[in-house]
Amino acid sequence: MINIVSSFKIRCMNGIPLTKEEILKMTSLRQTGHSINEIQRILLRGKGTISRYLKGVKVLPEYQDIIKAKQGASKSRSKKLWDEAHQKAKEALKRIINKKTKLLIAAMLYWGEGTKKDFSLSNTDPKLIKTFVECLKSLGVSNTDFRITIRTYEDLNKTRVINYWTRLIGIPRKQILNVNVLKGKKKGKLQYGMCRIRVTRGGTYLKLAQSVIDLVSNELAPKLPS
């Protein structure tokens, strides 16, 4: 352990070096089954600093059951908090997902992810693409108005990627404008590459979305620092 201490120099976020005693204490606590949060409370050091240093430090076999129990309890608390958040969101939104809010959602998605030269949006998240599509459909856009461009990678199955996006959006393959296969390995990170969806003759919807964006920004951010 002394060799580890002497060969590893780490600083906290406030620039104060960790002492040899702190490093020894941190290592000992981790080896005996203490969680990162517990060590942070004991040493009063940043979680990022502690996590980086303890990356290579393993809990001793005789303390494995202790750390597993803590991790299980942490996961249980996290699940409970997520369940509560989902329930609150469901209660809050169950009466407001209508045509007006779909217009707002489409405009905000376009604001964050869209291009400014036409009414199009690119993303790797199928749920985001599907949400954008469904919101547009509620505003009068039909399946025949959609055109897509797909960016995939050499280690992904091109046919599978194409079939996925066409099924998701609900359009035939002939509405794919282009499929770009890039070098690199993304399997496990981007299952289906990236999809760019554009509305043909989308000038009216572009103006509508931009008008919503202008109204929202003028209301919530009327004055910006110069």
Image: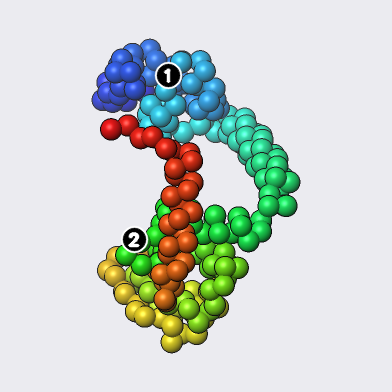
Residue 223 image offset from top left, x and y in percent: 38, 34
Task: Identify the residue at horizontal 48%, vertical 39% (top origin).
Answer: 220
Task: Identify the residue at horizontal 57%, vertical 68% (top origin).
Answer: 139
Q: For this view, does 117 lie left or right of residue 67?
A: left
Residue 144 image offset from top left, x and y in percent: 50, 82
Pick whichever, 9 or 191, lies toward us.
191
N-term mark: 1 or 2 = 1
Pick whichever, 66 or 128, lies toward us.
128
The kind of residue on which mark 1 rests is Arg
- Circle 2 Cα neighbour tier, 10 Å, few/some/many (<14 / 14–19 / ≥20): few
* Residue at numbered disc 2: 116
Q: Quadrant of residue 194?
A: bottom left
User: In the image, which disc is placed on residue 45?
Assistant: 1
Q: Is residue 63 visible?
A: yes
Residue 167 image offset from top left, x and y in percent: 54, 77
In this rendering, the count of numbered labels is 2
The kind of residue on which mark 2 rests is Lys
174 lies above or below 205: below
Task: Identify the residue at horizontal 27%, vertical 23% (top origin).
Answer: 9
